[in-house]
Amino acid sequence: MNRRVYLTKESFFEQNEALGTYLPYSEDLSVLGTPITVGNKTLPNRLACQAMEGCDGNADGTPAELTIRRYKRFAEGGSAIIWFEATACREDGRANPRQLWITEDNLDSFKKIVNDIKEYAMKSNGFEPLIIMQATHSGRYSKPHGVPEPLIAYNNPIFEGDKPIDKSRILSDDELDRIGAALVESSKLAEEAGFDGVDIKCCHRYINSELLSAYERDGKYGGSFENRTRLLRKSIEGAMQSTGKDFIVSSRLNVYDGFKYPYGFGVSKNGGVEFDPAEPIRLLKELRALGVELLNITMGNPYFNPHVNRPFALGGYDPAEHPLEGVARMLNGIALLKKEVPDMKIISSALSYLGVVAPQVCAGYIKDGGFDFCGFGRTILAYPDYANDILAGGMKKEKICLCCSKCSEMMRAGGTPGCVMRDKLYSDIYREFKENQK
């Protein structure tokens, strides 16, 4: 079966049956336009823009011209939720020199972009989206000055091979305490800037996510489940205590890493890489008990096994599974977790590969109670008005993301990612970028 053929309705049904993935499908998309309440806000639809980092901020961490352009397009596109991209809580936690970084000194620039997003959305669609700021420390992937400056929870031979990162780069418990305090401070600044909530980022092997698999680390941040989840739980508690009652505290959470134990969270301990939901279920229940109402669920590591978290048609390697199997792992895994915390509002991931049938699959899951919001990532770079088109009847094949991985290629090579195939501005940027690499 050719994994490089982009999905149509017909090929979706053929592949779904042949692979035994059996993703639900509904031609009735009306559920995607039904209101839902999160916190004190009633949202008009079930569509969410995922956090898509543009690597295009200014040196001082403020949004720059391309950042502002991107969010204007998202705001006009009709999504009920805009999950604002990774925003560093400290300089040493920036993933690149152009990553956004919120501070007291640059707060006004964040106030302006939040206000602009709400104004653009209200003018275009008649409502203000829920805007959640993703507060992050990049940990292992920190690169604040353009070269790797990793800060890690533990040495990991899967990533490091025969060149282990020096143990001086392993964060002490006291240093992790300070990162937790910085995440709380970023949450307070996010509220001041006008965001509706904050995401204490815990995904894709950045520091909070890496700690979830710190089975062999000593001290209060390693070993037991309580210790491995401590930074996440304490940062969320601190953010809740430091902000107003209507401010939403959430997380984009990895529930499965895809690496063998003891280096992966949510993975079977039998020596394979099968999904084991036991600890993720426990974590979701504990977060719900803390008062977390909204979670954004993901899997995998975009640096190491990107086919797990964003199944692709074309990429830097040929994965051992069909992309639709990756989509099924993600969506069925999310649906399994949702059943364990039914009153939690859950955002899905890994939808872009589905192309024009994504709305029908989303509608099928939402009708079945599998999740509450459809979260689109790469799609929004190619197709920022996807939500309005879905709500008007469906996605248009000439506008969908082709899952060609060129946006990721740009990001990994130090460029400013965007849709090379659908957005002429980024076609030109990509062409110039490739010329400069020669």
Image (cartoon, helix red, strand yellow):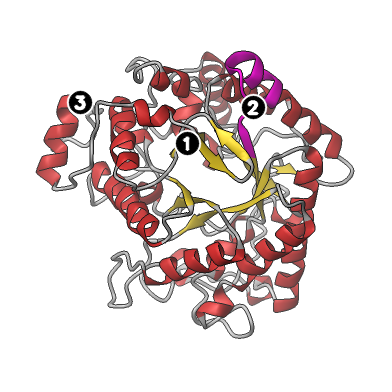
Q: Which is in the foreground here, disc 3 or disc 2?
A: 2
Residue under pointer 3: 9
Can you give x and y, in whole percent of width and height, for residue 17 in the image?
11, 41
Q: In the image, what residue type sits under mark 2?
A: Glu
**Foreground residue among 22 and 123:** 123
| Local secondary structure at mark 3 | helix
Q: Earlier in the sequence, mark 1 or mark 2?
A: 2
Can you give x and y, in whole percent of width and height, for residue 366 in the image?
35, 40
> Is 250 left, or right, of 3 in this rendering?
right
| Local secondary structure at mark 2 | loop
Q: Is residue 83 above or below residue 435?
A: below
Residue under pointer 1: 377
Can you give x and y, in whole percent of width and height, for residue 159 in the image?
47, 64
Residue under pointer 2: 128
Can you give x and y, in whole percent of width and height, for residue 317 in the image?
33, 45
Instruction: Give yes or no for residue 403 being in the magenta stretch.
Output: no
| Local secondary structure at mark 1 | loop
Q: Is residue 43 above or below residue 182?
A: above
Please tell me how many numbered marks the rendered image carries.
3
Stretch of the chain drawn in magenta: 117-131
Q: Earlier in the sequence, mark 3 or mark 2?
A: 3
Q: Residue furthest bottom?
A: 218
**Foreground residue among 184 and 86:** 184
Instruction: Give yes or no for residue 121 being in the magenta stretch.
Output: yes
Q: Earlier in the sequence, mark 1 or mark 3?
A: 3
Instruction: Find the distance from the CA under tag 1 to the CA under tag 2.
Output: 20 Å
Q: Quadrant of residue 436?
A: top right
| Residue 36 seen in render | yes
Q: Which is in the foreground here, disc 1 or disc 2?
A: 2
For mark 2, does the 10 Å Cα neighbourhood hold few (<14), some (14 to 19), or many (20 or more) residues? Answer: many
